[in-house]
Amino acid sequence: MAKVKPVFESGFEQLDPGVYIGLIEDWKFNSDEEDKECRIYRAQMRVQGGGSDGAQQSDFFRTKMKKNFGLRRLAGMMMKAGVIPEGEEVDTVSFLGEAKEQKIKEETVGKLVGFEITSRKYEGKTYMQISKYLTVKEAQEAQAGATTSKGQTKTETKKNVEW
């Protein structure tokens, strides 16, 4: 056994609404606890530049959703990161299975992708989430707007949208 020093804050920084550029650092692939046929792919990114430089942001993609929404979002993220050519349709089987999960990780880790954070209200609480993926160039163009309190450039975003 080892002794540990208590920590009173998690150090988790919630990003302000705005446009950011993130480095894809890692992926976690898990089964959904309620639906074992559904996999949850979680991308872990780190903000590059601006007042939130180094902050972590994650997003998740469910493999089993109405109209393949999670896989369509994943394809969009991979396109904006330059892994899949823009404008192409992607067969959902390209994302399913252990070998495909490993391929997603190998092809995206180390890539940069732009993303927009918006706030949403749910059951009286405000949550920040990625609402849109962008190429790095699109994100840089969008960042030419106003500056947040943390020094991160941002664009006008939708706020407090009810679910």
Image (cartoon, grey):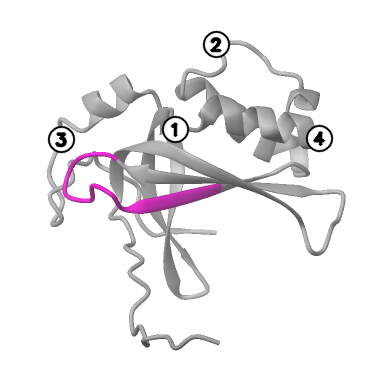
Q: CA separation, marks 1 and 2?
A: 15 Å
| 70, 85: nearer the viewer | 85
> On the image, numbered disc 1 is attached to which residue?
133
Q: What element carries label 4?
A: loop
> First in sequence: mark 3 or mark 1?
1
> On the image, numbered disc 4 is attached to which residue?
97
- The chief SS type of the magenta part is loop
| 114, 48: nearer the viewer | 48
Circles 1, 2 touching at the beta carbon (< 8 Å):
no
* Residue drawn at (37%, 47%) of the image: 117
Q: Which amino acid does label 4 sit on?
A: Gly
* Residue 142, position as x, y percentages in the image: 24, 29
> On the image, numbered disc 3 is attached to which residue?
145
* Quadrant location, the N terminus: bottom right
* Residue drawn at (33%, 24%) of the image: 136
Q: CA separation, marks 4 and 1?
A: 24 Å
* Residue 140, position as x, y percentages in the image: 24, 26
Q: What stretch is highlighted in magenta?
A: 48-59
Q: What residue type is labelled 1?
A: Tyr
Taking the image as shown, residue 158 lies to the left or right of residue 130, namely: left
Instruction: Classify 10 Å Cα crowding around label 2: few (below 14), some (14-19), many (20 and above).
Output: few
| 126, 63: nearer the viewer | 63
Q: Which of marks 2 and 4 is in front?
A: 4
Instruction: Classify 10 Å Cα crowding around label 3: few (below 14), some (14-19), many (20 and above).
Output: some
Q: Which amino acid does label 3 sit on?
A: Gly
> On the image, numbered disc 2 is attached to which residue?
85
* Residue 47, position as x, y percentages in the image: 31, 44
Q: Which of marks 4 and 3 is in front?
A: 4
Circles 3, 1 touching at the beta carbon (< 8 Å):
no
> First in sequence: mark 4 or mark 1?
4
Q: CA separation, marks 2 and 3?
A: 28 Å
